[in-house]
Amino acid sequence: MINSNVKRLWAEGHSVLNGWLSVASPFTAEIMAAQGYDALTIDIQHGLVGYETATTMLQAMRASGVTPMVRVPWLSPGDIMKALDAGAWGIICPMINNGEEARQLVSCVRYPPLGSRSFGPTRVTFAAGPDYGQHADSEVVCFAMIETAEAVEKIEEIVRTPGLDGIYIGPADLTLALTGRRYRTGFDREEPEIIDAIRHILDRAHAAGIRAGLHNGSPEYAARAVEWGFDLVTVSNDVQLLRGAAAASATRFRQLTGTAPQAKVQQGGY
């Protein structure tokens, strides 16, 4: 079986740079895979991506050597197992709230006797090798997302779940869960109480001997997270990168030519 780039980097003492794919396009995935990321995660939860397109995106990334992962929509055995069979080397599962849900997640990712994953690796044996079944449990990465008040309260039982490789913090939902709408939504938190919560979760994961990942909105904040000790950091996504680059290009043209955008207001038709 082809080994996981993520686990190799961890074994060598490095952090992992992860990219994020929300656009349902194998071409976009192929482009992102060639830009120097260690891993790329297809977002089926909030991204505009369905299962069949996600499979073609996994195919488009194969030649690059990047580790392909999937954020599944929910703690659903069918979604998790199908993503793995399609060729995901890692699963990020949202809204894991307690130890029992963490155990259910691990069970969906691991084959018996470690779990209950059904054997039917439709595509992944072509992507990973015919011996996939013998090595998948040691190579596939399993992340539980920590983003609720209950998860923070029960972090000890989550991080000590056998077979769980790491936790992945979603700072936007975590902030909403801990403070309501007192603060703006989004990533790259600067509020002391949220930073304390993030670092507490990180410390509990490392104390249990597992890894920790953080979702970020900028390279600067991701570098800061690595300094804190995070093992995997996600930097932006395809949607934000496209928007940012397009806005910068258009703005620069307007500056050079002294023109203004011509807004179109549609009223009752095309």
Image (cartoon, rainbow, N blue to C red):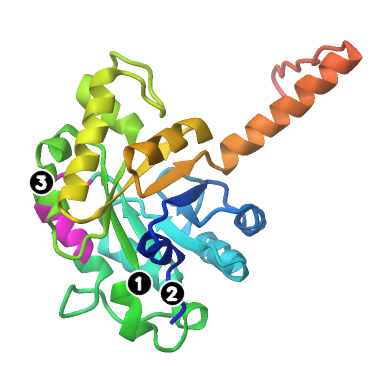
Separation of disc 2 and disc 3 at Cα? Answer: 30 Å
**Label 1 to label 2, Cα distance in Å?**
6 Å
- The span from disc 3 to disc 1 (Cα, nearest Å) is 24 Å
Q: Which of pointers 1 and 2 lies earlier in the amino acid sequence?
A: 2
Where does the magenta region start and end?
Answer: 96-106
Please check the rendered image and state whether residue 104 is part of the magenta-colored stretch, yes or no.
yes
Residue hosting label 2: 3
The chief SS type of the magenta part is helix
Residue 270, visible in the rendered structure: no
> Where residue 13 sits in the image (x, y, percent)?
38, 57
The percent coordinates of residue 265 (x first, y second) are 72, 16
Viewport quadrant of the C terminus? top right
Task: Please give the name of the residue rendered at 19% of the width and 74% of the height, measured from the top-left corner.
Answer: 116
| Label 1 Cα neighbours within 10 Å, binned few <14 / some 14-19 / many ≥20 | some
- Asked whether 82 or 157 is in front, the reply is 157
Q: Are marks 1 and 2 in contact (CB under 8 Å)?
A: yes
Q: Which residue is mark 3?
A: 156
Secondary structure, mark 1, is helix
Query: What is the residue that sits farthest to the bottom in this orientation?
Result: 130
Marks counted in the figure total: 3
Extreme residue toward the right, this view: 257
- Residue 196 drawn above or below residue 37: above
Asked if labels 1 and 3 touch by Cβ distance under 8 angstroms, the answer is no
- From the image, tell me which residue sits under label 1: 139
Mark 2 or mark 3: name the one nearer the start of the chain.
Answer: 2
The image quarter containing residue 119 is bottom left
Residue shown at the point (64%, 52%) measured from the top left: 35
Query: What x and y, as percent, mark residue 101?
Result: 15, 53
Tell me which residue sits at (31%, 32%) in the image. Answer: 173
Residue 163 drawn above or below residue 188: below
